[in-house]
């Protein structure tokens, strides 16, 4: 954002409550851009044989992850987990449990992660171009974002 959406003044770094923020330098306007994180729901989708990891069409070829989706306005995160599992994989959620909430500063997101036991025949939507089912004993997380949710879920199973 280059200009204030309220008065059209150029956006600048301003001191607000002892914090440097982007905002309108015109104090009478008072606009502040807080850049709050975006809520994302992540699903550790378990099917017969393991956990589904998918490849997004826009990612590097070797990168696979659990299923994620943006929370819609007014949507319950649990409903989002079920909806995204169906939309992205064509699988029906049989049981859904909260795993935890995780920061993902690299993408300015907060991740709400669920374990979803699901059934059906996998059919990928247009966002995904490949998937693999990883046996649970071979599944490993990583040190940020959805990888933290995988690590916590694996620990809870022990």
Image (tube, rainbow, N blue to C red):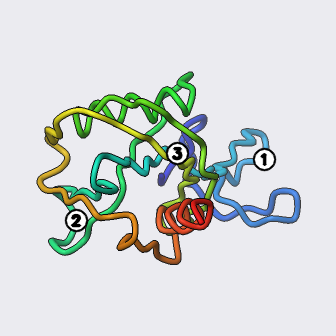
- Most foreground residue, 89 or 23: 89
Q: Which residue is mark 2?
A: 59
Tell me where residue 4 appears, x and y as whole percent.
57, 44
Q: CA distance from mark 2 to mark 3?
A: 22 Å
Task: Say if 26 sits above or below 154 in the image.
Answer: above
User: How busy is the neighbourhood of tag 1: few (under 14 within 10 Å), some, or many (20 plus)?
Assistant: few
Question: Going by the image, does 4 lie left or right of 51?
Answer: right
Among the 4 quarters of the image, the one containing residue 21:
bottom right
Q: Residue 114, which numbered label?
A: 3
The disc, 2 or 3, on the residue closer to the chain's N-terminal end is 2
Q: Which residue is mark 1?
A: 27
Q: CA distance from mark 3 to mark 1?
A: 43 Å
The disc, 3 or 1, on the residue closer to the chain's N-terminal end is 1
Whether residue 148 is visible: yes
Task: Say if 139 sits above or below 36 in the image.
Answer: below
- Quadrant placement of the C terminus: bottom right
- Looking at the image, which residue is at 60% across and 34% down? 6
Q: Residue 6, which numbered label?
A: none
- Looking at the image, which residue is at 29% across and 58% down? 53
Q: Nearer the viewer, mark 3 or mark 1?
A: 3
Task: Report if the CB atoms under discs 1 and 2 are less than 8 Å apart.
Answer: no
Tell me where residue 19 appears, x and y as whole percent.
80, 65
- Most foreground residue, 16 or 120: 120
Tell me where residue 13 appears, x and y as whole percent.
66, 65
Task: Report if the CB atoms under discs 2 and 3 are less than 8 Å apart.
Answer: no
Task: Report if the CB atoms under discs 3 and 1 are less than 8 Å apart.
Answer: no
Label 2 element class: loop
Task: Say if 155 sits above or below 88 in the image.
Answer: below
- Looking at the image, which residue is at 39% across and 31% down? 93
Task: Say if 107 sits above or below 144 in the image.
Answer: above
User: How busy is the neighbourhood of tag 2: few (under 14 within 10 Å), some, or many (20 plus)?
Assistant: few
Q: Nearer the viewer, mark 1 or mark 2?
A: 2
């Amino acid at each position: 954002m280059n200009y204030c959406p309220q008065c059209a003044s150029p956006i600048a770094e301003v001191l607000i409550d002892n914090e440097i923020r982007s905002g309108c330098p015109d104090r009478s306007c008072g606009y502040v851009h807080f850049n709050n994180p975006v809520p994302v729901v992540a699903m550790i989708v378990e099917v017969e044989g393991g956990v589904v990891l998918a490849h997004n069409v826009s990612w590097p070829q070797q990168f696979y992850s659990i299923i994620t989706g943006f929370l819609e306005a007014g949507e319950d995160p649990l409903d989002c987990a079920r909806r995204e599992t169906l939309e992205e994989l064509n699988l029906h959620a049989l049981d859904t449990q909260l795993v935890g909430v995780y920061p993902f500063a690299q993408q300015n997101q907060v991740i709400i992660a669920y374990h979803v036991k699901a059934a059906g025949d996998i059919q990928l939507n247009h966002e995904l171009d490949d998937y693999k089912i990883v046996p649970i004993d071979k599944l490993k997380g990583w040190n940020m974002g959805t990888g933290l949710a995988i690590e916590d879920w694996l620990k809870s199973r022990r």
